Image: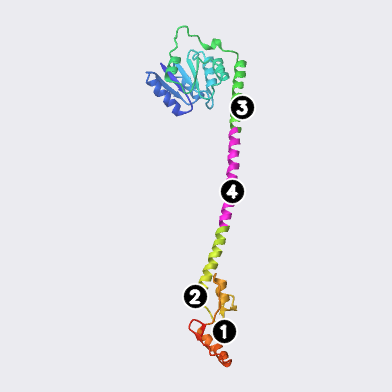
């Protein structure tokens, strides 16, 4: 038996071809209904297994053309689809003259069972075909229904895509806020570090100090006491006392004039 496999997907044709040839069938291939009609015009074929959803001429129209042709109406015709599988779709396959409808994917045993129908009492399906008007009406109903299904699927996909887009925008906005906050924090930390390094350089470097009053000149060219300068650049606090040398120099003469002979001992204590 010679089988014509019609499908616009090469992988589907190859799979079915391998399965049928393993069962000792001869297999021909066609990429769509138009290609199949050209091949049937000059190649002997016993049966056709055709997909439905194809470019140019689909499986329904191919089957109808085969059944209208007196030289081809004897062929066994199987419609094999994963897209047109509703009860309405299956009824149309019978209306256009298909012997069997099989939903993809199907075990090879199911396909073989459809091919090995007894030839006894085989009747040309053309004698059973309804009018062209009925066929076109059912065909239009199936196509419109399939279009509505696809539109509904597209709307769901668009809704999901829109939701994903909104979520991405929200995440991007949140990320931008976090980046701005982090950038601001880093800028603040950098300024603080720069100020700290400047203070360290000022304290560790060469300080301009007056030889007479011992005031220090800061980076703004102001002169200030050592205590003020160090307190401003560090956390140090000061307590004041008198060293022994200064006590001897500044306090001892006045004390002697008052008849007080106390002198400063080492450590700043009066004796």
Residue 218 appears anywhere in the view: no
Q: Residues within 10 Å of mark 2 (few under 14, many from 20)?
A: few
Specify few, some or many for label 3: CA neighbours under 10 Å numbering under 14, 14-19, or 20 or more. few
Magenta stretch containing residue 34, yes or no? no
Q: Secondary structure at mark 3?
A: helix
- Check the picture and name the quadrant holding the N terminus: top left
Mark 2 or 4: the one toward you:
2
Check disc 3 and report the residue beneath it: 148
Q: Who comes first in sequence, dot 1 or dot 3? A: 3
Q: Are marks 3 and 4 in contact (CB under 8 Å)?
A: no
Res 229 seen here? yes
Q: Which residue is mark 4?
A: 174
Q: Secondary structure at mark 1?
A: loop
Q: Which is more foreground, mark 4 or mark 1?
A: 1
Question: Looking at the magenta stretch, what is its main secondary structure?
Answer: helix
Identify the residue under disc 2.
Answer: 205
Marked residue nearer the N-terminal end (1 or 2): 2
Q: Is residue 158 above or below residue 208?
A: above
Q: CA distance from mark 1 to mark 3?
A: 97 Å
Separation of disc 2 and disc 4 at Cα? Answer: 45 Å
Check contact, mark 2 vs mark 4: CB within 8 A. Answer: no
Residue plotted at (57% across, 61% down):
188
> How many numbered circles are shown?
4
Disc on the earlier residue, 4 or 1: 4
Q: Which residue lies under the disc numbered 1? A: 213
């Amino acid at each position: 038996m010679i089988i014509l496999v019609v499908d616009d997907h090469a992988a589907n044709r190859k799979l079915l071809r391998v399965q049928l040839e393993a069962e000792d069938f001869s297999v021909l291939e066609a990429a769509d209904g138009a290609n199949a009609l050209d091949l049937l015009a000059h190649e002997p074929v016993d049966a056709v297994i055709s997909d439905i959803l194809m470019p140019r001429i689909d499986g329904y129209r191919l089957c109808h053309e085969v059944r209208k042709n007196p030289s081809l109406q004897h062929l066994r015709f199987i419609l094999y689809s994963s897209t047109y599988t509703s009860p309405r779709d299956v009824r149309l396959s019978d209306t256009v003259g298909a012997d069997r409808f099989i939903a993809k994917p199907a075990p090879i045993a199911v396909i073989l069972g459809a091919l090995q129908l007894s030839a006894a009492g085989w009747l040309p399906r053309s004698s059973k075909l309804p009018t062209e008007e009925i066929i076109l009406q059912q065909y239009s109903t199936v196509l419109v229904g399939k279009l509505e299904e696809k539109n509904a699927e597209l709307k769901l996909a668009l809704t999901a895509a829109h939701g994903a887009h909104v979520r991405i925008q929200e995440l991007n906005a949140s990320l931008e806020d976090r980046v701005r906050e982090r950038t601001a924090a880093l800028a603040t930390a950098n300024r603080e570090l720069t100020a700290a390094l400047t203070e360290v350089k000022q304290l560790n470097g060469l300080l301009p100090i007056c030889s007479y009053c011992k005031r220090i000149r800061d980076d703004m060219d102001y002169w200030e006491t050592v205590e003020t300068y160090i307190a401003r650049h560090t956390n140090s606090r000061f307590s004041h006392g008198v060293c022994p040398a200064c006590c001897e120099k500044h306090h001892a003469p006045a004390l002697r004039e008052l008849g007080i002979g106390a002198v400063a001992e080492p450590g700043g204590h009066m004796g």
